[in-house]
Amino acid sequence: MAAVVGTWAFSMAAVEKARRLLEIQTTSQQSTSQGHSQTERIQDDPELENDKETGCFVVGRGGFPNKAGVVQCDAAIMEGLPGRFGAVAALPGVGTPLTVAQMVMDKSEHNMLVGEGAVAFAKEQGFRIEDNSDMMTEASLAAYEEFLQSLKSPPKNHDTLGLIVLDEMENITVGVSTSGAPFKDPGRVGDSPLPGCGLYADNRARAAAATGDGDKIMCFCPSFHVVQLMKQGLSPGDACQSVIQDICHRVGNKDIFEIGLIALNMKGEVGAASTVPFPYTFWAQGMETVEQRQSCPYVHLD
Ligand code: GLY
């Protein structure tokens, strides 16, 4: 059973592309090919991170800059196979940070590289480090200037592009990419590149990804928690809902924060839960089109 799920409505294009790649492989019986890993399929669609208009302000090129005006991105990828993980954090100047994260997974002896070290590694791998001005759009520059003038609290949207792909061979891979908290302190790292927080995958084909306020999310390891609950037999939807309920219960209504979770299991079943209205996109073998679905915010009664 092949299936793909993505966070937010803007993941539609990535889910559509992953679906096409999975379908080609299905029809040409290439799914046995060892060489064409699931990771490569996710990486086949770096355009979304690199598109100034997609995931406006929150992902890759065109994302909100930090307080110093620099776009610094976090991205990570995890395969279901144990020990297959790669991440970059606070990486400037690269429009496709998830591709660099994949290189870390495939080529580095380490699993996570940050800041200058991530830049040096990206250069070694042949990436061009672009001027920050090329990472900005007119809109993100205007938002930054307004932030500097008003010194208002930054907007709360920390949206992350998260994508989980399951192929017919029951390989599962999850990837996340974000420019992080708007106008964050330079060097700030969110939940996205932290395994168990922004993403988690298990070799028995279950995975989860998170989006929302990474400074809060990283205190709860929600992606790991969702996967553990699925291992114990919960459906993806029930596992996501249970983790959101647990977090709400622990922090209480007053301190609840933005979080959305998606999950996929080896049957190609999908689930999501959130504390905010949370659209996500989904396709599974047998469905004619990619669907946009909506997770309604969980309301906790203290
Ligand atoms: N969830 C993205 C971030 O807060 O960095």
Image (cartoon, rainbow, N blue to C red):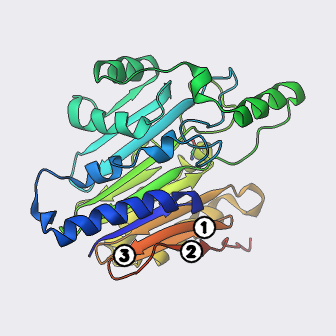
Q: What kind of element bears circle 2? A: strand
Q: In the rendered structure, which disc, 1 or 2, sits on the residue that comes first in sequence?
A: 1
User: Label 1 vs label 2: CA separation?
Assistant: 6 Å
Numbered tag placed on residue 293 in the rendering: 2
Image quadrant assignment for residue 5: bottom left
User: Label 3 vs label 1: CA separation?
Assistant: 17 Å
User: Label 2 vs label 3: CA separation?
Assistant: 13 Å
Quarter of the rendering occupied by the C terminus:
bottom right
Residue at the location (31% across, 39% down)? 102
**Residue 94 to residue 233: above or below:** above
Q: What kind of element bears circle 1? A: strand
Image quadrant assignment for residue 62: top right
Where is residue 200? Give x, y as percent.
37, 54
Numbered tag placed on residue 177 in the rendering: none
Which residue is the extreme one toward the right? 150
Where is residue 209? Give x, y as percent.
45, 57
Would the CB of label 1 be found within 8 Å of ligand 1? no
Where is residue 131? Give x, y as percent.
55, 18
Residue at the location (51% across, 62% down)? 12
**Residue 147 to residue 206: above or below:** above
Numbered tag placed on residue 284 in the rendering: 3
Residues at badges 1 and 2 in contact (C-beta under 8 Å)? yes
Query: Given the image, on which type of amino acid does mark 1 rest?
Result: Pro
Where is residue 243? Give x, y as percent.
52, 66
Mark 1 packing: few (<14 Cα in 10 Å), some, or many (20+)?
A: many
What residue sits right under mark 1 in the picture? 279
In-front residue for pair 233/291: 291
Mark 2 packing: few (<14 Cα in 10 Å), some, or many (20+)?
A: some
Q: In the rendered structure, which disc, 2 or 3, sits on the residue that comes first in sequence?
A: 3
In-front residue for pair 261/95: 95
- In the image, taking residue 160 as reference, residue 286 lies left or right, namely left
Camera sees residue 196: no
